Image: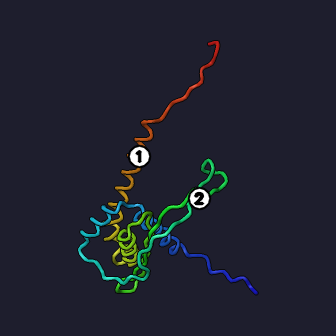
Amino acid sequence: MANRRSPAPTAEQSAERRARQRWMSVLAKADFADLDALWNNLPSKPAWTVVRAPEVGMVMTRGRAGGTGQRFNLGEVTVTRCAVQLEYGAIGFGYVMGRNRRHAELAAAVDAMLQTPSRRDALERAIIAPLTLRLEESRQKRSRKAAATKVEFFTMVRGS
């Protein structure tokens, strides 16, 4: 039996995949209060049907010794997932850490809306860009806090 492989993705398909991975990551990591506020400010929201109701489960996370070494099971984290279909057919998925069902549903709805090219630019400006900015500010704040606790070690040389 011949081994059938799907053709390699085109450059356009690869760019679409990277864009979707980026916005799904932002939606998953966003603070729910921020996402909810931005969602409520949208002028028009499509109706959707829940394809997979928000459900809570556990996922095993893996780590690497030293960040690059052998993989090991780090522990389980709670994840909520959801899938919705917009009235015009687009299907979106939401996966978020924790137990916030509404967060997963909104992430799925925004994912579906962003897959519609005519809505993408407006949604990027209204939701994804502000969430990305807040995530970056949070990351920088954590970095500054960690840097403040940094200890400088030095070696003393005898006989100098």
Kindly give the residue lying farthest to the top in the view shown: 159
Separation of residues labelled 1 and 2 (CA atoms): 22 Å
Residue 85: percent from the left, percent from the top? 39, 83
Asked which secondary structure carries label 1, the reply is: helix
- Quarter of the rendering occupied by the C terminus: top right
Q: Amino acid at mark 1?
A: Arg
Residue where numbered disc 2 is placed: 62
Residue 123: percent from the left, percent from the top? 33, 70
Q: Residue at x 32, y 65 (%)?
A: 35
Q: Residue at x 47, y 35 (%)?
A: 150
Q: Quadrant of residue 102?
A: bottom left
| Left or right: residue 127 compared with residue 58 | left
Q: Which colour scheme appears in the figure? A: rainbow
Q: Quadrant of residue 46?
A: bottom left
| Left or right: residue 129 compared with residue 151 | left
- Quarter of the rendering occupied by the N terminus: bottom right
* Mark carried by residue 142: 1
Considering only order in the chain, which callout, 2 or 1, is on the residue closer to the N terminus? Answer: 2
Q: Are marks 1 and 2 in contact (CB under 8 Å)?
A: no
Please state which of residues 140 and 51 is positioned toward the viewer in this rendering: 51
Name above or below for residue 98 compared with residue 156. Answer: below
Q: Amino acid at mark 2?
A: Arg
Residue 18: percent from the left, percent from the top? 49, 68
Q: Residue at x 47, y 66 (%)?
A: 79
Asked which secondary structure carries label 2, the reply is: strand
